[in-house]
């Protein structure tokens, strides 16, 4: 699949916490944690589990930098 989002970061799922409606997915990206909150339905449909290789795709109009 080709996406227009430029920020695509390969990582490994560290944890999945399923709630009643939402799921919190923590991904290790080169030693940094990126957290995604998606619907539980989507997490189950993708069969996301700890240890899975995933790509974090970030599509945003604002990306802030701090130095």
Image (tube, rainbow, N blue to C red):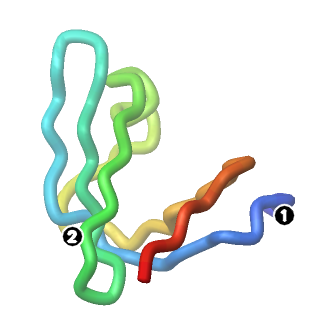
- Say left or right for 65 vs 8: left
Q: Which residue, given by chain and number where applicable, does mark 2 sit on?
A: 51
Q: Residues within 10 Å of mark 2 (few under 14, many from 20)?
A: few
Label 2 – label 1 distance at C-alpha? 24 Å
- Residue 20 placed where, x, y %? 19, 11
Which residue shows up at 67% across the image and 52% down it? 62
Can you tell which quarter of the image residue 43 is in? top left
Residue sitting nearer the eye, 18 or 66: 66
Q: Residues within 10 Å of mark 1 (few under 14, many from 20)?
A: few
Q: Residue furthest top?
A: 20
- Discs 2, 1 touching: Cβ within 8 Å: no
Q: Residue at x 85, y 59 (%)?
A: 4
16 or 7, which is in the foreground?
7
Residue 3, x across and y down, in percent: 81, 59
Foreground residue among 63 and 20: 63
Question: Where 44 falls versus 46 (above or below)?
Answer: above
Determine which of the numbered discs, if any, sits on residue 2 in the image. 1
Instruction: Give the numbered dot on residue 25.
Output: none
Q: Position of residue 48 (x, y in %)?
A: 32, 49
Residue 6 position by quadrant: bottom right
Q: Left of 63 or right of it: where is 39?
A: left
**In terms of secondary structure, where does tag 1 sit?**
loop
Residue 5 spot, x, y in % from top left = 76, 61
Q: Is residue 45 above or below residue 46?
A: above
The quarter holding residue 58 reads bottom right
- Work out which quarter of the rendered image holds the C terminus and state it: bottom left
60 over 17 or under it: above or below: below
């Amino acid at each position: 699949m080709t996406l227009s989002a430029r920020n695509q970061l390969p990582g490994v799922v560290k944890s999945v916490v399923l709630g009643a409606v939402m799921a919190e997915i923590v991904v290790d990206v080169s030693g940094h944690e990126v957290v995604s909150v998606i619907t539980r339905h989507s997490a189950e449909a993708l069969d996301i589990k700890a240890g899975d290789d995933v790509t974090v795709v970030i599509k945003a109009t604002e990306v802030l930098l701090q130095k």
